Amino acid sequence: MSAQVTRRSLVLGSSAVVATALARTRPLSAAEAAAPVAPAQSGGGLARLIANENPYGPAASARRAVADSLATAWQYPMGHDQDLKKQIAEREGLTPSHIMLADGSSEILRIAGLVYGTGGREVVAARPTFGFLQDYARQLGATVTEVPLDEQLRHDLKGLAAAVTGKTGLLYVCNPNNPTGTLIPGPELRPFLQAMASRTTVLVDEAYLDLWDDWPAHTATDRVRAGDPVIVTRTFSKLHGMAGLRVGYALAPPEIIQRLEKHRMTLLGCAGVAAATASYQDLEFQAFSRARLQEGLAITTGALRELKLRHVEQGRGNFVFFDTGGPLADFSAAMRRAGYQVGRPFPPYDTWCRVSMGTVEQMRGFAAALRDYF
């Protein structure tokens, strides 16, 4: 009797292949699983130093969780995110009603732009900074007021406060800032947020904050606990190396979470939530990611200091922002020839490049390419 091939058998067969491949990571420690599994290469064989990704993730524990989740992938995702919400709430001193999980933090940013930036209201943000929220709000007809960074490439808090008016629906603060990596320290941030929250809703994007061990000293979550109209967004794309699995979350007072949830655009897949739940508990892998990131940053900033190139010292992102001294297009083309995909323009800093951290080995190679270029 010949075998009968059906759509179901193909799907099940494909799932088995995926599960087998993922299961091969089971014996690996965090360190062993890291570099060889996810090399930061683009399609052209270039080292991918352009998108602020983590080339070491996901953790082996997260990969095992994805493999295990395939057994129930036939089910619609309903209630599968409750454990992760409880874990986040416990760590943050909040309740699950303070938590919203979404398709990356970018979904929450866009929902916030819709909820707080439309209906004749305005959005205030720094420039340059991460632009998903502002761009989406503009598409919906919102007015966006942008305040230039100060001379140290930090958020100009006085300028932002002055830009907030009675029409401002949302103040957006990316901390640490993308693309500069500059941090508003907690003791400076918290009184600013308290003052601004009496005038408008504030969203603090902390996508990069947990890349450093001292992140609790700088987070804005205490204003959430106080019940202020403050939204904090985080992501599993950076520290946890899960940019392709699309999981992020918001912390906010329950009434704000309810308002955001009404405009949810997606349902989170079981695989992403399973991976995030495992990775959130995997403190060993998180420490490994931080250590490798900081090693890459030290190599890169060491080369920039040696070459006397202006750059952001002690940046808090998984990237470095530096002045190439000439047209960015020329520098990017030269790095591409050397095997490294870097940079995109961040006006008005037209000669500056944001280089994302690849593996430690890749950053050694990039430092050598810098020395050859300059």
Image (cartoon, grey):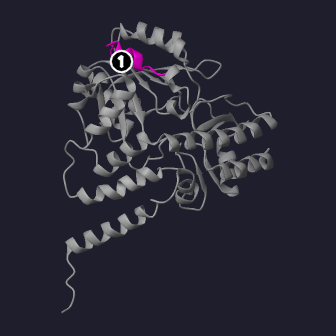
Residue shown at the point (48%, 60%) measured from the top left: 27
Please name the residue that numbered disc 1 is placed on. Answer: 224
> In the image, is residue 223 part of the stretch drawn in magenta?
yes
Residue 61 left/right relative to 43: left
- 31 lies above or below 320: below
The amino acid type found where label 1 is placed reads Val
Residue shown at the point (70%, 41%) measured from the top left: 300
Q: Which residue is the extreme one toward the front?
A: 27
Range of the magenta residues? Answer: 218-230
Where is residue 253, by image quadrant?
Answer: top left
Residue 267, image x, y percentages: 25, 44
> In the image, is residue 227 part of the stretch drawn in magenta?
yes
Residue 272 left/right relative to 371: left
Where is residue 339, by image quadrant?
Answer: bottom right
Residue 167, image x, y percentages: 33, 12
Specify the quadrant that holds the C terminus: top right
Residue shown at the point (55%, 19%) measured from the top left: 184
Residue 114, image x, y percentages: 29, 28
